[in-house]
Image: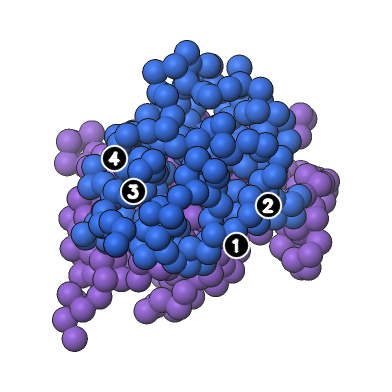
Chain colours: A purple, B blue
């Protein structure tokens, strides 16, 4: 079978319409998780089946697609999803954040600030921020209906009681447009402030959990905290070993079995562009 | 024989383009987008409203035709292109009509506290984009935006019950704009 045997962007038009309706309701109620009839995709759950479906329903033939996995364009997940859309949608791709019109991401927000012309699609494993505190869907639904988020404040408080600070370092809960508490997907909390007042449309897709949610542009996104323990966007206190950046999120790379290690930018495009410019 | 022409000639590309325009309008209230690659339906439906229906509605979406648009040629066009079941206002996930014909608005679904997404989307056809604009603020809007609305009070009341409420897409000619329930009328 040739690649042309697939419809544009793999999904059939009925499915895309269903996903598009869910996306529009998600935009209308920022941070609320809209149930959708997630399809089986030709990749396993956990590989971005939700993000891929949102991307497929949003993609234009003229888009320039970028896919990142933990900030990197060249890891297995990013490469395979990029190739998937190259083959089934015939879209142009790029590794440059500034050149992309649609960016699908697993667990990072690019360091380069996003613009109004861009859409950021997040891959989400567990969309329900309260799930590990309350396993029953009926109850979490009521929690959101009543905006009864005290349980989450207690969880953050227990962090402080045990560790002296809020130890949650990724998937750090946020409040969207002064209403819904939302899981920002497992991005490091370093990235949380980038979601606030962002000019780009942010869409979230959870395939296995069958949920789509969204943050419209220029929307207030606040990380939950306490007056005496304000939110801090933390990162490793080093500079990047390759490009020297002091303002980007760093990965720790083990270099030998004798305790050797280095810290490098997690955003490969940001790092490469800086290194190229000789900064 | 009624005229059943005006469907998409290249559905994947045309609906993708139309959806991005609708998404842009819904995500940035106040922005008026001009559609290209339009679908067309029999009068009085505008090209923009026909395009929205072709992009979002199908046999799984219940559609309400307000009296302004409840005519046989349009019913036939909808049956042929969408297959959407035509229903009463209370059951509709989409409602199409002029602003005056869509009233009274309390007939439409506003969702439930547990499922606010189960709310109607109103397609307000024949919208006058050049009328006196009102000031908007809220998600999707940097500082403030402006948009001509058919009236002010109904949208004010609709926003007051956020996260419940219906959402509106205004169509006229080949242009559209949107006002989600999250938008505050300043």
Q: Which residue appears at 60% of the width and 62% of the height? A: A35
Name the mark on residue B90. 2
Q: Nearer the viewer, mark 4 or mark 2?
A: 2
Q: Nearer the viewer, mark 3 or mark 4?
A: 3
| Crowding at mark 2 (Cα within 10 Å: few <14, some 14-19, many 20+) | some
Question: Helix, strand, or loop for circle 4?
Answer: loop
Locate the N terminus of chain B by quadrant. bottom left
Would you place residue A138 above or below residue A190 in this image? below
Point out the tag, 2 or 3, that comes first from the N-terminus.
3
Locate the C terminus of chain B by quadrant. top right
Work out how far the residue at label 4 is from the one at label 2, CA to CA, in angstroms.
Answer: 30 Å
Residue marked by disc 3:
B42
* Cβ atoms at labels 3 and 1 below 8 Å apart: no
Question: Helix, strand, or loop for circle 3?
Answer: loop
> To which chain does the residue with label 2 belong?
B
* Cβ atoms at labels 2 and 3 below 8 Å apart: no
Q: Nearer the viewer, mark 3 or mark 1?
A: 3
Would you place residue A41 above or below residue B168 in this image? below
Badge 3 and badge 1 both on one subunit: no
Q: Residue furthest front?
A: B1
Point out the tag, 4 or 2, that comes first from the N-terminus.
4
> To which chain does the residue with label 3 belong?
B
Badge 4 and badge 1 both on one subunit: no
Q: Which residue appears at 81% of the width and 47% of the height? A: A146
Work out how far the residue at label 2 is from the one at label 1, CA to CA, in angstroms.
Answer: 21 Å
Confirm whether residue A219 shows in the render: no
Residue marked by disc 4:
B35
| Crowding at mark 4 (Cα within 10 Å: few <14, some 14-19, many 20+) | many
Q: Which residue appears at 35% of the width and 71% of the height? A: A12
Residue marked by disc 1:
A35
């Amino acid at each position: 079978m040739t690649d042309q045997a697939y419809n544009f962007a793999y999904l059939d038009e009925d499915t895309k319409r269903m996903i598009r309706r869910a996306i529009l309701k998600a935009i209308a109620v920022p941070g609320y998780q809209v149930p959708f009839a997630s399809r089986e995709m030709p990749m396993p759950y956990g590989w971005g089946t939700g993000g891929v479906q949102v991307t497929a329903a949003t993609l234009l033939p003229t888009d320039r697609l970028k896919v990142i996995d933990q900030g990197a364009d060249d890891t297995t997940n990013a490469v395979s999803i990029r190739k998937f859309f190259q083959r089934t949608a015939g879209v142009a791709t790029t590794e440059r954040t500034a050149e992309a019109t649609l960016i699908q991401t697993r667990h990072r927000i690019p360091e380069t600030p996003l613009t109004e012309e861009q859409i950021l699609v997040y891959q989400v494993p567990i969309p329900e921020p309260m799930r590990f505190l309350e396993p029953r869907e009926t109850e979490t639904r009521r929690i959101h209906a009543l905006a009864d988020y005290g349980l989450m404040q207690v969880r953050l408080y227990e962090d402080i009681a045990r560790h002296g600070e809020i130890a949650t370092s990724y998937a750090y809960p946020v409040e969207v447009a002064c209403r819904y508490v939302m899981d920002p997907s497992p991005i490091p909390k370093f990235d949380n402030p980038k979601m606030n007042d962002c000019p780009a449309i942010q869409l979230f897709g959870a395939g296995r959990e069958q949920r789509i949610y969204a943050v419209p542009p220029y929307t207030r996104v606040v990380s939950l905290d306490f007056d005496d323990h304000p939110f801090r966007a933390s990162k490793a206190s080093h500079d990047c070993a390759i490009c020297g950046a002091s303002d980007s999120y760093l990965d720790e790379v083990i270099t030998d079995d004798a305790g050797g290690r280095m810290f490098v930018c997690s955003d490969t495009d940001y790092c490469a562009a800086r290194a190229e410019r000789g900064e | 024989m009624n005229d059943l022409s005006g469907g998409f000639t290249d559905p994947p590309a045309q609906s993708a383009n139309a959806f991005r325009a609708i998404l842009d309008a819904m995500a940035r209230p106040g922005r008026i987008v001009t559609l290209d690659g339009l679908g067309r339906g029999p009068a009085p439906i505008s090209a923009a409203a026909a395009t929205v229906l072709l992009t979002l509605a199908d046999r799984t979406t219940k559609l309400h035709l307000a009296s302004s648009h409840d005519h046989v040629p349009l019913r036939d066009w909808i049956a042929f292109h969408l297959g959407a079941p035509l229903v009463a206002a209370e059951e509709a996930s989409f409602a199409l009509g002029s602003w005056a014909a869509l009233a009274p608005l309390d007939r439409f679904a506003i969702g439930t506290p547990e499922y606010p997404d189960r709310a109607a989307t109103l397609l307000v056809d024949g919208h006058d984009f050049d009328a006196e604009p009102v000031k908007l603020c809220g998600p999707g809007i940097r500082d403030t935006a402006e948009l001509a609305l058919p009236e002010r009070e109904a949208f004010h009341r609709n926003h007051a019950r956020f996260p419940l409420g219906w959402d509106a897409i205004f169509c006229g000619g080949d242009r559209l704009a949107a006002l989600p329930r999250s938008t505050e009328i300043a």
